[in-house]
Image (spheres, grey):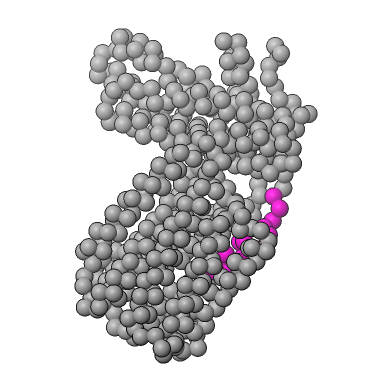
Amino acid sequence: MTLAIVLVIVAAVSLAVILRLAVSRSLQVSAGTSPAGQIQPLDIAAFRNLTNPSEDQYLRRRLPSAEFRRVRRERLRAMSSYVQVAGKNAAVLVKIGQTALASDNANTSEAAHQLVDQALLLRRNCAFALIRIHMALAWPFPNEAAAPILRGYEQLNGCTLLLTRLQNPAAPVHISANW
Amino acid sequence: MLQPHSLIWHYLWVAPNVLLLTLGFLLFRRRIYKRYPAFLTFVILGAIAQLTIYIADVSPAIDPKTWWYLFWAGLLVEGTIKFFLIGEIFEVTFQDYHSIARLSRILIRSVGVGLVLASAVLAGIAPQDGRFGIVSGAHLLEEAIYLVESGLLVFFFLFSAHFKLALSRPIYGIALGLAVSACVHLATWAILTNGGLPNSQRTILDLLNMATYHVCVLIWFYYLLVPGRVATKSIVSVPEHSLEVWNQELERLLHQ
């Protein structure tokens, strides 16, 4: 009977998880709001500083080891926050890209597909990077977990700009005052 | 009313399978089957298997042993097709996205192997219910199939939700119907196999299984045949601050 109870609980929890995901999906579809507003700004210069291995080496040389370990943990926690924001932004870009996938324009559809693929790759790498960062918090070893996230975020940049331009060529996309 | 061979019992066994055959015919006519061949196979063979077992059940010419052999055959056919169908759900959803296609294949195989091992262990420690081997074996196999099926489908929903992937309407409907059916059947077969219930109470659980399956068939009808709302192809505007940051990055990369 114990086995039956365990399996019934497993089945009930599974059903609850599936129905919760199904309801949240239906609510998202019916809301029909643009997800673009959910993108959070990310300070890429600061992020690059955190992922730079030479910064780590510099701090190791300059600080006493106990102080260095404390600072390194702080930096890893900050890195974790940045990676989480990058992952959330990637999820928003997946949604944005998917809304444009059904476009009649082949170029727009192709750009949307590229954006979704890049955003999925970034989200996948964020999950792996978070695991590695938390491992580095528990066990200190050389950590470059977030470096691929930075590169992925930079690649997403190009995909998003391309899609935005294809969808609305008249939109004032500020490349640079120098261009 | 809630007895074997009552009117509701006949209805709940026959109606969902007749509806499934109708769904199969409509999918074939509308050429939807080309995208989901495993689902069409599941719909047609599953319905034929269930109707064959039903006819064998009500026919006085079929002895109990033959009926259980038929039940076993139907169970094996249905179980095999269901796993192909779950593979099709994963393939259709993730194959277009190279960045996660390989990861999804590795994970579904790992989760599948883990679930098969778990169900084998559960079958090994399940208490003997004193029934004939052919009966208790069928119950254990049902429990194992639904355990693996519901585990894989929960994993599918969690995996696609993690990546915020919007599922296509037919795939969402197929997966939702299968998942609801698998979870309810897992709970009922767990009680039927391990609970030591008297026959009178087993019938209630049989009826619950049949009613759930009926609901799931209606879910498949709705999601595969009723068109969804047309998505508005509105222009997506990315917030200014993000573009500014990304533009600065692009500029820096180009000047490196």
Residue A160, given in percent of the width and then of the height, sits at 63, 30
**Residue at left offset 60%, top offset 26%:** A157
Q: Is residue A170 shown left or right of residue B229? A: right
Q: Quadrant of residue A101?
A: top right
Q: Position of residue B28 (x, y in %)?
A: 64, 63
| Residue B237 visible in the picture | no
Front in this rendered view, residue A18 or B88: B88
Q: Which residues are magenta?
A: B217-231
Q: On screen, A22 above or below B21?
A: above
Farthest-out residue, right: A170
Foreground residue among A9 and B35: B35
Q: Nearer the viewer, residue A69 or A105?
A: A105
Give the overall secondary structure of the magenta segment: helix
| Residue under the point 46% across and 38% down | B102
The quarter of the rendered structure image containing the C terminus of chain B is top right
Quarter of the image for residue A35 reads top right
Give the percent coordinates (x, y) of residue A18: 47, 57
Residue at (67% x, 40% y) in the render: A100
Q: Nearer the viewer, residue A75 or A1?
A: A1
**Residue A10 in view, yes or no:** yes
